[in-house]
């Protein structure tokens, strides 16, 4: 085999290997985000003005619903509104667990995993 | 259920080369119960026939690869192939890949949303970009609505289709450059084997978290609401799509709830099941005077996700409805 033929054969092999590596090496699809919806929601909530409340129902690492309220003159009203909004979504998404207050004002009153 | 994409892609490719193979076995508009008769208060015999239909709503992120930041050409055949198992598939953002999806769904009738239209800004942009588009495959902005509905052939009603652009958008640059698409809604009427009729609506609303974007979404929903109100109430209604509305955003929640109240739409309950998604997509529905819908099963179609990767940047939502058409059968004895 001549040197030229060797080079052609080598180039062909490299192309073939490269092609195989590309199809096997680059997985199809889009990587899922790292931040969960609830983490993002919690971040947004912390930026809201007081008096505020956040209520949740379901699994915060899976299917859950939430409701929030902010800029209320009385904390109890904010709590009620957050729970009411949460209940409305709970019925929509057919989440079985009751809505519970997750945060009152800036204070988180429940761990993320707690039910 | 999680399936490896590579295997699915291979199957999708096989279907492309042999049209009709594999999907022909899928049932369409399955009639699940035949009769169930009863006597009404007026003495008229009421006969009910029921059908079950499954509806998929999926934003498939079908942009030019550099903008999509991946290679959508890899994903699209698999998406189309997987969508075959649904009687109705509503897609958003199929901009560059509608035909790839269509090739995978030979037994479905596909209807696209509105085109680019005659907005002078878009026409100018099109002219400007045309020379580049010739050399770049899958690069043809500005776009139309980028939405489409595929329904099983057995459910389709010929020419029962509407589409309308919203003619509203906010910007051309940045992450929410929605003016590159002429967003709108589309309507497709279907008839089940038992004769029940449903108007299917598919839409994709303005993106963005600003107050301005939220206001535009409100105006777009007003246009859609007026279109639905103009139709006869006899038909049931299913509205799916990417609403770009987050219940956790101030202002957005009220907009969607007002839209639902106005049209008496209920949320099917379909929503993301993985914690990494943002809830922006919905499947809403209401009964018609001659057609009733009951939600049988809803959720995220997890076959579009494989471990830490997905076939799009949105969750695929599905809802399975039981469709009932009460019919008066006078003079018949039980």
Image (spheres, grey):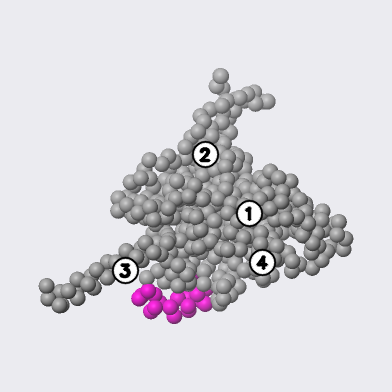
Q: What is the CA distance from the residue labelled 4 to the residue labelled 1? A: 27 Å
Q: Residues within 10 Å of mark 3 (few under 14, many from 20)?
A: few
Residue B103 location (% of width, % of height): 37, 55
Q: Secondary structure at mark 1?
A: loop
- The residue located at (58%, 40%) in the rendering is B296
Q: What is the CA distance from the residue labelled 2 to the residue labelled 1? A: 31 Å
Nearer to me, A79 or A106: A106
Q: What is the CA distance from the residue labelled 2 to the residue labelled 3? A: 48 Å
Q: Is residue A100 magenta?
A: no
Residue at numbered disc 4 = B214
- Magenta region: which residues? B113-136
**Is B196 above or below relative to B162?**
above
Disc number lying in front (2 or 1): 1
Disc number lying in front (4 or 1): 1
> Left or right of A56: which side holds B110?
left
Tag 2–tag 4 contact (CB < 8 Å): no
Q: Chain of mark 3?
A: A
Disc number lying in front (4 or 3): 3
Q: Chain of mark 2?
A: B
Q: Main secondary structure of the magenta part?
A: helix
Residue at numbered disc 2 = B52
Q: Secondary structure at mark 3?
A: helix
Residue B211 seen in the current view = yes
Tag 2–tag 3 contact (CB < 8 Å): no
Residue B38 location (% of width, % of height): 61, 24
Nearer to me, B56 or B180: B56
Q: Chain of mark 1?
A: A
């Amino acid at each position: 085999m001549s040197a030229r033929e060797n080079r052609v054969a080598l180039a062909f092999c490299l192309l073939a290997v490269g092609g195989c590596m590309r199809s096997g090496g680059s997985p199809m699809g889009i990587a899922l985000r790292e931040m969960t919806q609830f983490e993002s929601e919690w971040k947004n909530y912390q930026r809201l003005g007081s008096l505020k409340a956040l209520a949740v129902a379901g699994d915060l690492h899976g299917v859950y619903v939430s409701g929030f309220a902010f800029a209320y003159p009385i904390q109890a009203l904010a709590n009620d509104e957050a729970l009411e909004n949460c209940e409305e979504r709970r019925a929509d998404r057919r989440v079985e667990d009751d809505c519970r207050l997750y945060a009152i004002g800036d204070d988180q009153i429940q761990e993320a995993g707690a039910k | 259920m999680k399936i490896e994409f590579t295997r699915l892609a291979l199957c999708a490719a096989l279907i492309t080369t042999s049209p009709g193979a594999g999907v022909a076995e899928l049932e369409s508009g399955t009639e699940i119960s035949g009769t169930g008769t009863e006597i009404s208060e007026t003495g008229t015999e009421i006969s009910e026939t029921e059908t079950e239909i499954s509806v998929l709503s999926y934003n498939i992120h079908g942009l030019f690869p550099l903008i999509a930041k991946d290679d959508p050409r890899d994903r699209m055949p698999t998406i189309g192939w997987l969508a075959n198992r649904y009687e109705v598939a509503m897609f958003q953002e199929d901009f560059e890949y509608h035909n790839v999806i269509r090739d995978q769904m030979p037994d479905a009738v596909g209807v696209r949303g509105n085109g680019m239209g005659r907005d002078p800004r878009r026409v100018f942009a099109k002219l400007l970009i045309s020379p580049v588009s010739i050399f770049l495959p899958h690069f043809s902005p500005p776009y139309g609505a980028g939405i489409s509905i595929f329904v099983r052939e057995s459910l389709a009603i010929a020419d029962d289709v509407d589409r309308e652009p919203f003619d509203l958008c906010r910007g051309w640059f940045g992450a929410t450059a929605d003016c590159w698409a002429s967003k709108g809604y589309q309507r497709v009427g279907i008839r089940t084997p038992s004769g029940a009729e449903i108007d299917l609506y598919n839409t994709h609303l303005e993106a963005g978290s600003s107050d301005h974007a939220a206001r535009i979404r409100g105006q777009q929903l007003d246009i859609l609401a007026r279109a639905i109100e103009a139709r006869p109430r006899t038909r049931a209604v299913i509205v799916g799509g990417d609403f770009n509305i987050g219940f956790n955003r101030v202002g957005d929640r009220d907009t969607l709830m007002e839209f639902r109240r106005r049209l008496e739409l209920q949320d099917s309950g379909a929503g993301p099941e993985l914690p990494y998604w943002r809830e922006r997509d919905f499947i809403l529905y209401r009964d018609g005077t001659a057609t009733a819908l009951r939600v049988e099963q809803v959720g995220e179609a997890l076959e579009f996700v494989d471990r830490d990767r997905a076939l799009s940047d949105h969750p695929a939502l599905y809802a399975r409805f039981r469709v009932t058409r009460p019919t008066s059968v006078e003079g018949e004895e039980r």
